[in-house]
Image (cartoon, rainbow, N blue to C red):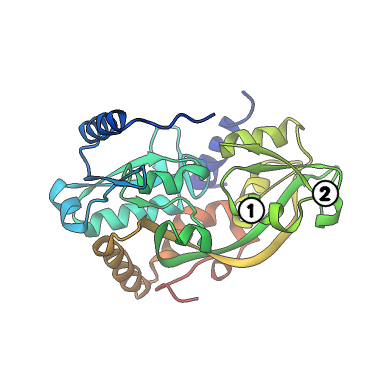
Amino acid sequence: MDNGSLEVQHWFQSTRPRGRTRPSAVFAIFAVCWFQSTRPRGRTRLFNASFSVEARPLDAIQKSGEVVIGVFSDKAPFGYVDAKGNYQGYDVYFGNRLAKDLGVKVKYVSVDPASRVEFLVTDKVDIILANFTVTKERAEKVDFALPYMKVALGVVSPESAPITKVEQLKGKTLIIAKGTTAETYFQENHPEVRQQKYDQYADAYNALLDGRGDAFSTDNTEVLAWALVNKGFTVGITKLGNLETIAAAVQKGNKSLLDFINTEIVKLGKEQFFHKAYKETLAPVYGAASNPDDLVVEGGKL
């Protein structure tokens, strides 16, 4: 086993057990002033009594010398923190290249699945690169760039009681990470399946390891990687639902930054950048278990 797979295995092992009041006009004015004083990154706007912070355009990011990117810290091998405290993974590999070509330093911020939209809307990050599946509902709130990966859902379960079809989940407990496409898929298509939900991926996997649920569903690319380094578990359902795409996202209306990312993705496609990213970050984990062409999207074209 090489250093890449050992590092990811170390990460996986390290995650094992352990009535509304309507504000007055005075309060609203105070809240706006306070919010502006604590949000130096962008301009505050008040829309229908809800706050939004205007995103930094491309030139402001370049002028600041730093781009802030939201990634996962607990979803190896796509976004995780290694033993030295550094962010690693497929998404991070892409983020590093974006920062390099922007001519700025990169600051990574850890996000949860359910907080990805919020972090863009409130301008806590400039870009989300956190295995963000493109959906119609999300596209109403954020702007997605061209895709760089494709996925479906998968289900992982103990080898001693494998789940090989959805019908077997009836009367059982399915572990889910909040804010994921798996949550939406099962709510809409299989409401009879009992869901046990967690905010963090690490907590969800620990629940499976502890036997608090019968199976766990998320992107097939991730459960396949997890099962490879966690003996005693198998991915009995490798493809569930429609084939979907993963893309970077920016705050809605941030056209200059979105255009830069799209142009970058097209340019990177000419050098087969995402195949290189796969080789560096995913191949050490998957080995011969996966074909990169089943996952990688080059130049934004499926």
Tell which tag, 1 or 2, sits nearer the viewer.
1
- Amino acid residing under circle 2: Leu
- Viewer-side residue, 108 vs 272: 108
Tag 1–tag 2 contact (CB < 8 Å): no
Where does residue 299 sit, x and y in percent of width and height? 39, 73
Element on which disc 1 rests: helix
**Residue wearing tag 2:** 169
- Tell which circle, 1 or 2, labels the residue nearer the N-terminal end: 2
> In the image, what residue occupies the spot 31% across and 57% down?
97
Q: For residue 164, what is the image quadrant?
A: bottom right
Q: Is residue 135 visible?
A: no
Tell whether 66 sits left or right of 245: left
**Counting other residues with Cα less than 10 Å from the Cα at mark 1, is it few (<14), some (14-19), or many (20 or more)?**
some
Residue nearest the observer in this picture, 153 or 19: 19
Q: Position of residue 87 (x, y in %)?
A: 40, 41
Task: List the single residue furthest toward the left.
Answer: 63
Q: Is residue 130 above or below residue 266?
A: above
Looking at the image, which residue is at 81% across and 49% down?
192
The disc placed on residue 184 is 1
Is residue 178 visible in this depiction of the protein? yes
- Relative to residue 191, is residue 27 depicted above or below? above
Give the residue furthest to the top.
18
Amino acid found under the numbered disc labelled 1 = Thr
Q: Quadrant of residue 84?
A: top left
Rounded to the nearest angstrom, the CA distance separating label 1 from label 2 is 16 Å
Q: Secondary structure at mark 2?
A: helix
Which picture quadrant has residue 17? top right
> Residue at the spot x=35%, y=76% of the render?
270
Asked whether, in this view, residue 221 is left or right of residue 101, the answer is: right
